Image (cartoon, rainbow, N blue to C red):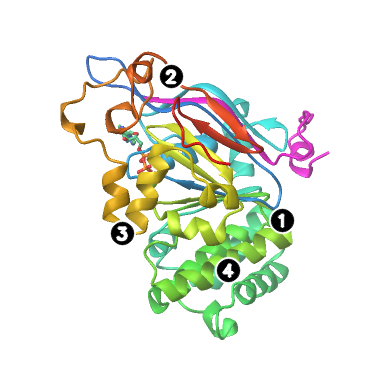
Amino acid sequence: MPAFAQSIGLPPQNSAAVALLVERLRVEFPVLRGKPKVAIRDLDISIRPGEILGLVGESGAGKTTLARAILNLPPAPGRITAGVVQFDGVDLLRLSEGELQRIRGRDISMVVPNPRGELNPLVPVGVQLASIAQVHLDKDRHSARAMALEMLQAVQIPDPERRMRAYPHELSGGMAQRVVIAIALMCSPRFIISDDATSGLDVTVQAQILELLRHLVRKQSSAMLFITRDIGITAHFCDRVAVIYRGEIMEIAPRESFFLAPRHPYTMLLLAAFLHNPQLRRAWTPPDASVRANVDTEIGCAYTDRCPRARKICQTTKPLLAERISGHFVRCHFPLERE
Ligand SMILES: Nc1ncnc2c1ncn2[C@@H]1O[C@H](COP(=O)(O)OP(=O)(O)O)[C@@H](O)[C@H]1O
Ligand SMILES: [Mg+2]
């Protein structure tokens, strides 16, 4: 039985090989005098222990809303109106606030950008780390401090003894991000969400931090949802890649299949932008985008008005997220055909 389910006295359900299971999740934002805006639409994903799932999509696609909804903390005034978020077999959307608070930061951690904003400027980083171990793991002061030091070593902070006593403003951006990751990993969480957490860092530091995150995820057999606007990073870092557009998964596949044989027109556009390839970009942009009708995303494909392959059926029937070859799913009536 998963330790965390046991600790809150709940029986686990049947999901041995899955760490996180999201089913038919829907998040809506109320709109003044109108239908609510659907930010996450009937979304399904699952992540296995030790697996890193990349989630890519442009700004406003719903990435942060999804991450926060998984923690049962949708951004206000958003509301989760349907679905299941199962972690280790327990539905997080049905837990009490007290039970959730025990899980967040211990079994599930989230790393966000702007590391300094996450740290208390008035408290030395060693004390901040140690307090996590005291609160969540019931450690006494002495062993909490030892754990904090161990964590700073694990995230490869130079001279960790001295850094224990440092205040956040005394650290570089890269080091502050390492401290935030140390805090996130302190309790060996079974599930980690990184929401654009490394995009503000310079490229070398980012590469080091990603390497470190991957190492720790593998070592602890954690599952990870890695959110980024940069599709290029996922090619190196993730086991599977999902593309989100207007709150819907458009394509999801193992990394090799995703990059060797992408199938969704929107994925092609993202790749064209990443490759700085104007021909490819033109090929995947409709010539008459501006004159297309606004499609009702409740019934039609959300990508219709930007899609060069769109036909009548795309406006009237939402395509299912269908499996094309093993593990490679595409939501499109006219996906690229590949051998
Ligand atoms: N606080 C909010 N109030 C109203 N609408 C919001 C709020 N936060 C997000 N949204 C809506 O949800 C959509 C997804 O936003 P978000 O999850 O922040 O996207 P991403 O992280 O992919 O940039 C946005 O297009 C916006 O319409
Ligand atoms: Mg975001």
The magenta segment? 1-28
* Number of the front mark, 2 or 4: 2
Q: Amino acid at mark 3?
A: His
Precedes in sequence: disc 1 or disc 4:
1
Residue for badge 1: 138
User: Are dots 2 and 4 in contact, CB under 8 Å?
Assistant: no
| Residue identifier under label 3 | 276
Instruction: Calculate the distance from the C-alpha at mark 1 to the C-alpha at mark 3.
Output: 51 Å
- Residue type beneath disc 1: Asp
The three-letter amino acid code for the residue at tag 4 is Glu
Q: Residue at x 41, y 15 (%)?
A: 317
- Please state which amino acid type lies under the numbered disc 2: Lys
Q: Earlier in the sequence, mark 2 or mark 4?
A: 4
User: Where is mark 4, residue-wise?
Assistant: 211
Label placed on residue 315: none
Foreground residue, 125 or 16?
Answer: 16
Task: State the residue lying farthest toward the left.
Answer: 291
Tell me the residue that label 2 is attached to. 318
Residue 196, can we see it? Answer: no
Dot 2, crowdedness within 10 Å: few (<14), some or many (≥20)? many
Q: Alpha-carbon neighbours of circle 1 within 10 Å: few (<14), some, or many (≥20)? A: few
Q: Earlier in the sequence, mark 1 or mark 3?
A: 1
The quadrant of the picture occupied by the C terminus is top right
Task: Calculate the distance from the C-alpha at mark 3 to the C-alpha at mark 2.
Answer: 30 Å
Q: Quadrant of the N terminus?
A: top right
Mark 3: give few (<14), some (14-19) or many (20+) Cα within 10 Å. few
Q: Earlier in the sequence, mark 1 or mark 2?
A: 1
Task: Judge left or right: residue 133 versus residue 40.
Answer: right
